[in-house]
Image: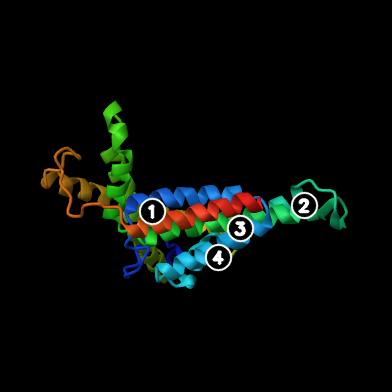
């Protein structure tokens, strides 16, 4: 399950989406999230799904890689679907067993909320899979740079977010190694109900937190040894520039928002 988490991982290929400016990709990701919430009907799910598939094609990303990131959230998806299915008000009753009833409105709401969660995860995965952490840091810092005039720590916040994203694959790999080592010593993480399996994960968390703090200490020492003192006077290897590809991507997302507003 740990290997199924794609958030924070970078997929190194040459593509149209990879070449986009990171600032544009961040803004378009936010706009995509707005489009997902603007689409209040099931018909709006069709253009959003088509947009995700076309974006994956333009990014040369396997669709299985995006679906792989949804797998760890299957419990949350099932819980969200059932919660909206059985506890949403509605008039058109499809099925009723004792006091539990399923309505058409509840079914539509359950599908819509579950699909929104899937769209949000895939949209965030598209951003991280097509953008290197260092480039993503530069984009975040440039977007938040106007706030630095009022004392907002734009560079420090962007650096923290970048380090957090960079450490997600590292911590997942470390957790996988610890889990395999404990399974070799007789630990059982697969059998039992949900509560028992969650309780079995507790011995995994202690060495994982110890390893995370050790890596954080090593990183801090390495940054101090290289005389890191924030963004003041810092130069960049890559100069961010807006190209015609960015305008094409903005037009595509704008068209998606318009379609979602029209469909409703």
Q: Where is residue 4 in the image (x, y as percent from the top left)?
A: 46, 66
Residue 205 in view (yes/no): yes
Q: Is 185 drawn above or below residue 26 in the view shown?
A: below
* Residue 6 vs residue 137, the one in the foreground: 137
Residue 186 in view (yes/no): no
**Circle 1 Cα neighbour tier, 10 Å, few/some/many (<14 / 14–19 / ≥20):** many
How far apart, in angstroms, are the residues tagged by discs 1 and 3? 22 Å
Q: Mark 1 points at which residue?
A: 25
How far apart, in angstroms, are the residues tagged by discs 2 and 1? 35 Å
Return the disc, 1 or 4, that comes first in the chain's sequence: 1
Kindly check if marks 1 and 4 are in contact, taking CB atoms under 8 A apart as contact.
no
Disc 4 vs disc 2: which is toward the camera?
4
Give the residue displayed 34% in from the left and 63% down from the top.
Answer: 18
Q: Mark 2 points at which residue?
A: 105
Return the disc, 2 or 1, that comes first in the chain's sequence: 1
Disc 1 vs disc 3: which is toward the camera?
1
Q: Name the residue under label 3.
A: 115
Disc 3 vs disc 4: which is toward the camera?
4
Return the disc, 4 or 2, that comes first in the chain's sequence: 4
SS at mark 3 in the image? helix
**Circle 4 Cα neighbour tier, 10 Å, few/some/many (<14 / 14–19 / ≥20):** few
Kindly check if marks 2 and 1 are in contact, taking CB atoms under 8 A apart as contact.
no
Return the disc, 2 or 3, that comes first in the chain's sequence: 2
Return the disc, 3 or 4, that comes first in the chain's sequence: 4
* Residue 69 vs residue 104, the one in the foreground: 104
Q: Quadrant of residue 96?
A: bottom right
Q: Residue 50 carries which label?
A: 4
């Amino acid at each position: 399950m740990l290997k199924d988490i794609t958030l924070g991982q970078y997929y190194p290929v040459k593509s149209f989406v990879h070449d986009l400016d990171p600032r544009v990709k961040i803004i378009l990701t936010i706009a995509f999230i707005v489009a997902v919430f603007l689409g209040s009907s099931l018909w709006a799910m069709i253009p959003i799904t088509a947009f995700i598939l076309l974006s994956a094609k333009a990014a040369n990303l396997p669709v299985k890689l995006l679906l792989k990131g949804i797998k760890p959230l299957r419990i949350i998806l099932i819980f969200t679907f059932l919660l909206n299915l059985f506890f949403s008000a509605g008039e058109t009753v499809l099925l009723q067993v004792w006091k539990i009833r399923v309505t058409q409105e509840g079914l539509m709401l359950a599908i819509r909320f579950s699909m929104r969660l899937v769209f949000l995860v895939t949209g965030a995965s598209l951003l991280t899979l097509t953008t290197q952490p260092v480039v993503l840091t530069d984009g975040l810092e440039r977007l938040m740079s106007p706030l630095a005039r009022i004392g907002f720590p734009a560079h420090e916040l962007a650096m923290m977010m970048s380090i957090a994203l960079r450490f997600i694959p590292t911590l997942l790999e470390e957790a996988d190694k610890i889990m395999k080592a404990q399974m070799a010593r007789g630990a059982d993480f697969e059998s039992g109900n949900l509560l028992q399996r969650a309780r079995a994960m507790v011995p995994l968390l202690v060495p994982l937190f110890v390893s995370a703090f050790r890596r954080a200490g090593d990183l801090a020492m390495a940054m101090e040894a290289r005389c890191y003192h924030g963004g003041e006077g810092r130069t960049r290897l890559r100069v961010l520039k807006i190209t015609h590809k960015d305008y094409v991507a903005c037009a595509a997302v704008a068209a998606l928002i318009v379609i979602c507003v029209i469909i409703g």
